[in-house]
């Protein structure tokens, strides 16, 4: 069995903590078993490991989230990168070609696809393992996992069953149809007929997707599929595959399952009302403050409110109204002001654009001990680095230079450079140029041992 975790999201629903590169699954606001706060993706990845599924798990995502995934989960995992954002069918098709032509999966192997961010008990992933058996017993094209509802929710989609499966062992349901977000009374009636919440988890044999791609004239080799990715229909997997399948079954799961997709649902699972600097008076009931800024936030006698502050902005909202933030921000094209990378993190401190077209951007960069920046150069900007703390080495145009607190380095556009942190290093970086964007990076090498080969003798 192979597991593909779909990591997407535009970062609007939990603004301002979420952004284009840091979607909701990367927010470190959940309490972990050993104390420190963790993100949804860290929680899920740990649960997959505990269920014994980690060696055959993959994450499919867009380019903008790759660095964040490596930062939070480490670099020793397989990430399937979409050349561009399209929809779930192209993403799963690309993942299928990766499993077939790169990972060496057999055509008869089962593939489980699921979101990267469900909030569930560990038992959920042990149940996921049963999908392979269900495919065998039922002979179905697709096997879904559905959650037994605890109340008639209008927020979720429903799997509407037909007959009960007669195979030995745990029963499964034959799927008759699907309903998206019905009215409460309709949901209650469907639940009386054993309908399940659709949690977005489904399984199929790899040959289902590979044969479909062959029939449609698409390549089944990963590298070629990546080159032709834009030709794939920009549709959901539901539209392209599920609605056309002849035989679908569902495996019921009785246990806790939540979609923490809005501030009011996420704060239900945040144990402390205050994260970051601030003060809440005792009469501020059912109120949460999540503050990533260095300035304190103080609330006096304010109840049922979420206050979230980050370099991207500040949100103050009644909890019941907080889901509206996605619509309010849907046309915003603001650049992310905070990002995590495989080497550490950075925060934008200031950005100015002058009438003559010149721009100035100031960042605070933290490179973790033992890690390094790529060997790179920029085409459109000059940089000045001021080292605040830490020690390390700077490779600049082939020369290896010691780096310590108080050092100042000028890096003109076109200069080849990298940095290796011996201890954790903090730098203030000031960029100047006509277009200061993250895409203005040409990387030549990532590994420090390889980068050292560029040192001039």
Image (cartoon, helix red, strand yellow):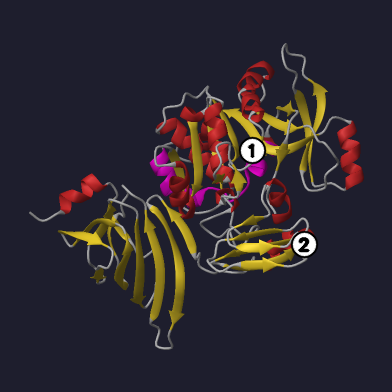
Q: How many numbered tags mark residues here? A: 2
Residue annotated with mark 2? 321
- Residue found at x 35% / y 73%: 431
Q: Residue at x 46, y 74 (%)?
A: 350
In the rendered structure, which disc, 1 or 2, sits on the residue that comes first in sequence?
1
Residue 218 rendering spot, x and y as whole percentages: 48, 41
Residue 317 visible, this angle: yes
How crowded is the residue under tag 1: few (<14 C-alpha within 10 Å), some, or many (20+)?
some
The residue that appears at 27% across and 46% down in the rendered structure is 447
Residue 438 locus on image (x, y percent): 40, 64
Tell me the quarter of the picture where residue 110 sits. Answer: top right
In reply to whether residue 223 is colored magenta, the answer given is yes
Farthest residue, direction bottom? 355
Q: Residues within 10 Å of mark 2 (few under 14, many from 20)?
A: few
Residue depicted at 56% across the width and 60% down the height: 19
Q: Residue furthest left?
A: 457
Of residues 175 and 2, the one nearer the viewer is 2
**Residue numbers of the magenta segment:** 222-243
Label 1 close to label 2 by CB (< 8 Å): no
Judged from the image, the secondary structure of the residue bearing numbered disc 1 is loop
Image height of 187 relative to 446, above or below: above
Residue 97 screen position, x and y as percent: 46, 36
- Circle 1 sits on which residue? 241
Quarter of the figure with residue 118: top right
């Amino acid at each position: 069995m192979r597991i593909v975790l779909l990591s997407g999201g535009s970062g609007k629903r939990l603004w301002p903590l979420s952004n284009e590169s840091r979607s909701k699954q990367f927010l470190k606001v959940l309490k972990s078993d050993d104390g420190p706060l963790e993100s949804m993706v860290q929680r899920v990845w740990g649960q997959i490991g505990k269920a014994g599924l980690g060696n055959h798990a993959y994450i499919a995502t867009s380019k903008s989230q790759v660095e964040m995934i490596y930062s939070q989960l480490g670099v020793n995992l397989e990430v399937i990168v979409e050349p561009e954002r399209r929809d779930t069918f192209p993403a799963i098709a690309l993942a299928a070609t990766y499993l077939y032509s790169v990972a060496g999966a057999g055509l008869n192997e089962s593939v489980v696809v699921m979101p990267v961010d469900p909030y569930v008990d560990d038992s959920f992933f042990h149940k996921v393992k049963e999908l392979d058996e269900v495919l065998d017993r039922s002979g179905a094209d697709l096997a879904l996992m559905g959650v037994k509802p605890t109340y008639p929710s209008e927020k979720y989609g429903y799997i509407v069953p037909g007959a009960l499966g007669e195979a030995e062992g745990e029963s499964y349901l034959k799927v008759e149809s699907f309903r998206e977000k019905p009215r409460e009374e309709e949901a209650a009636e469907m639940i009386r007929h054993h309908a399940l919440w659709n949690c977005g988890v489904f399984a199929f044999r790899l040959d289902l997707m590979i044969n479909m791609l062959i029939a449609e004239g698409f390549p089944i080799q990963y590298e070629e599929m990546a080159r032709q990715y834009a030709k794939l229909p920009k549709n959901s997997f539901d539209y392209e595959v599920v609605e056309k399948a002849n035989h679908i079954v569902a495996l019921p799961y009785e246990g806790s399952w939540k979609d923490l997709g809005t501030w009011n649902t996420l704060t239900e699972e945040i144990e402390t009302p205050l994260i970051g600097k601030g003060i809440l008076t005792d009469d501020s009931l059912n109120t949460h403050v999540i503050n990533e800024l260095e300035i304190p936030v103080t609330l006096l006698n304010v109840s049922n409110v979420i206050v979230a502050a980050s370099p991207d902005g500040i949100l103050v909202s009644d909890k019941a109204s907080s889901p509206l933030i996605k619509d309010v921000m849907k046309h915003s094209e603001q650049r992310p002001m905070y990002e995590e990378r495989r080497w550490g993190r950075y925060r934008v401190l200031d950005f100015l654009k002058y009438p003559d077209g010149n721009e100035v951007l100031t960042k605070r960069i933290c490179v973790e001990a033992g890690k390094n920046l790529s060997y790179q150069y920029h085409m459109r900007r000059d940089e000045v680095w001021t080292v605040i703390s830490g020690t390390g080495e700077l490779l600049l145009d082939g020369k290896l230079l010691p780096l310590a607190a108080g050092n100042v380095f000028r890096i003109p556009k076109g200069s080849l450079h990298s940095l290796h942190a011996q201890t954790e290093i903090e730098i203030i970086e000031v960029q100047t140029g006509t277009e200061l964007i993250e895409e203005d990076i040409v990387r030549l090498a990532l590994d420090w041992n390889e980068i050292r080969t560029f040192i001039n003798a």
